[in-house]
Amino acid sequence: MFLSQVDLNPARRGMHRLGRSPQAMHAAVLACFPPGSDAAGAGDGRVLWRLEQGSSHRATLYVSSPSRPDFTSIVEQAGWPASESTWRTGSLDPLLGRLTRGQQWAFRLTANPTHAVTTPGRDRGRTMAHVTVGQQTDWLLSKAARNGFDIVDGEQGQAQLEVVHREVVRFGRRTDGHHRQVELSRVTFDGILEVNDAEALRQAMISGIGRGKAYGCGLLTLARTP
């Protein structure tokens, strides 16, 4: 597995287009892999991405993938083509290989917290987004253990977990020849986790957490704790 960081230019017209539409960004990311690669996720792992727009002058695209990408096309559309350093790619395998129970890591996750709402007379429930910070936080706390980690408690006994960004993105998607409007809730969490099942956490990192993985959700990244 590889993790890439791509510097993007918010002032570029291409960045405006990609930033507004997760569908367009998803297509642009997949175009960075050659035909026949395992970018579609048929093997171990899949392509996940997260866009962070910190200011009007800076944006960063993070991509994890089972094969090494070439981001030339995205940089030409939305990046800094004249810069000598436009993206950086490194192997995730050393980090994945040294995960062990009891380690603590700072993490970031952008996710699509949802729940199923059952309707009388229907076999399947309708998937709905959680809308409050409390609901969204509880969603991640409920997902943590099955994905190989626990959220660490702080000095006051509260989980070291914070919602740092929330947004609802609306964009068009063409399916089976029909154009429809999609509404997607994206929530970015920062926190401190403790590994309780290293293999489950590895799988979560390479396959993603929750729904909306094609649209900028699901990518869990780790960093050393402060």
Image: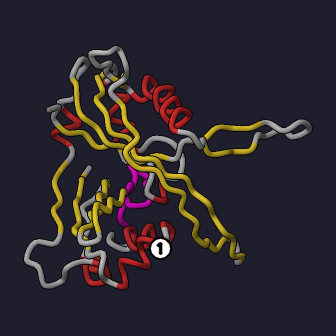
Query: Which amino acid lies under the numbered mark 1 shown in the image of this protein?
Result: Ala
Outermost residue toward the left in this view? 84
In the image, the segment drawn in magenta is 36-49
What colour-coding does the image apply? secondary structure
Note whether residue 44 is visible.
no
Q: What is the quadrant of the C terminus in the image? A: top left
77 over 88 or under it: above or below? below
Residue 124 picture location, percent across and down: 78, 40
Q: What residue lies at 45% left-to-right and 41% top-to-bottom?
A: 209
196 over 48 or under it: above or below? above
Residue 38 picture location, percent across and down: 37, 59
170 over 15 or under it: above or below? above
In this figure, which residue is indicated by the disc labeled 1? 24
Residue 74 is inside the magenta segment: no
Q: What residue lies at 18% left-to-right and 67% top-to-bottom?
A: 87
Image-quadrant location for residue 177: bottom right
Residue 140 picture location, percent across and down: 47, 32
Q: What residue lies at 28% left-to-right and 29% top-to-bottom?
A: 192
Circle 1 sits in a helix, a strand or a loop, which is it? helix
Residue 39 is inside the magenta segment: yes
Q: How many marks?
A: 1
Image-quadrant location for residue 129: top right
Outermost residue toward the front in this view? 156
Q: What residue lies at 67% left-to-right and 45% top-to-bottom?
A: 128
| 171 relative to 86 in the view: left or right | right
Q: Nearer the viewer, residue 170 or 95?
A: 170
134 over 26 or under it: above or below? above
Residue 211 picture location, percent across and down: 54, 47
